[in-house]
Each structure stands twice: as C-alpha cells, then as structure tokens.
Amino acid sequence: MKVEWIENEMRETKRRLADLEKCLKDIQQQCEHHFQEFHEYAKCTKCHKTVSLYY
Ligand SMILES: [Zn+2]
C-alpha cells in the first residue's frame, strides 16, 4: 500500500466522520429527549444522547 493512498483514505474517513458527527448532533438537538437513568449517567432512548448525573 502506498503512503499517499493511506493518507488520502484517512483524510476522507475523517471528513466522513465529521459529517456523521454533525448529523448526529443535529438529530440530538431536535430530539424531544426521553432519558433513561443508569448509575452514573442518563441516556436518551430515542437519540442516545448521554448526560452525566454527577457534576
Ligand atoms: Zn434524545
């Protein structure tokens, strides 16, 4: 495998990951959360957003 090819793949993958993260963030911002509580955190059953219960 060529180094250039690997670097290019890494760049593309990072871009794709950033797109997916943005997509998920948008969904989580629009979600009417329904949190289920666990020991140290709560997780939304719809969008899977998690929040810590300890501050
Ligand atoms: Zn949610």
Image (cartoon, rainbow, N blue to C red):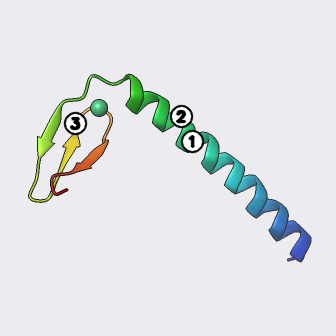
Which of the 4 image quadrants contains residue 1? bottom right
Q: Distance between the residues labelled 2 and 1?
A: 5 Å
Asked whether 48 or 9 is in front, the reply is: 48
Q: Closer to the N terminus: mark 3 or mark 1?
A: 1
Q: Which mark is residue 23?
A: 2
Indicate the secondary structure of the residue bearing disc 2: helix
- For the point 39% across and 32% down, the residue is 28
Characterize the local packing of mark 3: few (<14), some (14-19) or many (20 or more) Cα atoms within 10 angstroms. few
- For the point 31% across and 42% down, the residue is 49
Q: Is mark 2 within 8 Å of ligand 1?
A: no
Q: In this view, does 15 lie to the left or right of 36?
A: right
Asked whether 24 or 5 is in front, the reply is: 24
Q: How far apart are marks 3 and 1 (CA)?
A: 19 Å
> What's the residue type where badge 1 is placed?
Leu
- Give the percent coordinates (x, y) of residue 42: 17, 47
- Residue at numbered disc 3: 45
> What's the residue type where badge 2 is placed?
Cys
- Residue at numbered disc 1: 20
Indicate the secondary structure of the residue bearing disc 1: helix
